[in-house]
Image (cartoon, rainbow, N blue to C red):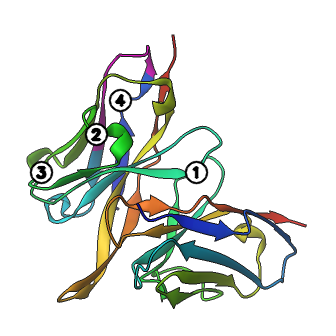
Amino acid sequence: EVQLVESGGGLVQPGGSLRLSCAVSGFTFSSYWMSWVRQAPGKGLEWVANIKPDGSEKYYVDSVKGRFTISRDNAKNSLYLQINNLRAEDTAVYYCASLDYYGSGSHYYYYMDVWGKGTTVTVSS
Amino acid sequence: DIQLTQSPSFLSASVGDRVTITCRASQGISSYLAWYQQKPGKAPKVLIYAASTLQSGVPSRFSGSGSGTEFTLTISSLQPEDFATYYCQQFNRYPITFGQGTRLEIK
């Protein structure tokens, strides 16, 4: 069974740090792009970061650049999000997701295929 | 950044109704668009990718169309389990962006 399980969320003070983890099973983790997506309470979905299968390319939404770092350990089938200098607006459920794609050649249509259940980060003093 | 604007933001409909949700992109994104369904307290689930390709296991009452800047998600005959929030998402370029969501409720 394909499964993504997030952990590491919690209550943290502004300026604090957390490391979120996503444990993957049921598919060849090392072959897939991975994402973090977050959802603030009562709000919509916001893409946070992507990482290439070998970890050589990483992309971030502007609001987290310099504070968040996405990484992966393919030997441990795990994805990570290091979150530093937390702000109240980072309060959200954080989901990890695997990217699949359709197409070939110069056209690859990506989509977020499998999602974890999320881990909650609350930033408050 | 590419902005995605969904309309309507809220939709009230009855079981058996045909409903259409529109997603407009601020610039052309070819067919690099996906649709997701999210139920309260649950992770999103992909319905459609490449604008019109139905994900495996998704009922055929769901369909997607469009290219460029205008896209639609259609549910041909609403079922009780379809009442949820729907999001479009573009993968044409970074940053990846989502629409604001369309909440579909039972009339």
Whichever of callouts 4 and 3 sits on the residue coming sooner in the sequence is: 4
The chain letter under disc 4 is A
- The structure residue drawn at horizontal position 8% and vertical position 54%, both measured from the top left corner, is A56
Question: Under tag 2, what secondary structure?
Answer: loop
At mark 4, the secondary structure is: loop
Q: Is residue A107 above or below residue A97?
A: below
The type of residue carrying mark 4 is Gly
| Left or right for B73, reference A74 | right
Q: Is residue B42 magenta?
A: no
* In the rendered image, the vertical position of residue A33 relative to residue B16, given as above or below: above
Give the Cα distance between marks 1 and 4: 22 Å
Chain of the residue where label 2 is placed in the rendered structure: A
**Callout 4 environment at 10 Å: few (<14), some (14 to 19), or many (20+)?**
some
Disc 2 from disc 3: Cα separation: 23 Å
Same chain for the residues under marks 2 and 4 in the image: yes
Q: Which mark is residue A65?
A: 2
Residue A73 in the image, given as x and y percentages of width and height = 13, 45
| Residue A8, numbered label | 4
> How would you rate the neighbour count of disc 1 (Cα within 10 Å): few for under 14, some for 14-19, many for 20 or more?
some
Q: Which is nearer the eye, A54 or B98?
A: B98
Rounded to the nearest whole Å, what is the CA distance between mark 4 and mark 3? 19 Å
Q: Which residue is mark 3?
A: A74
Under mark 1, the amino acid is Gly
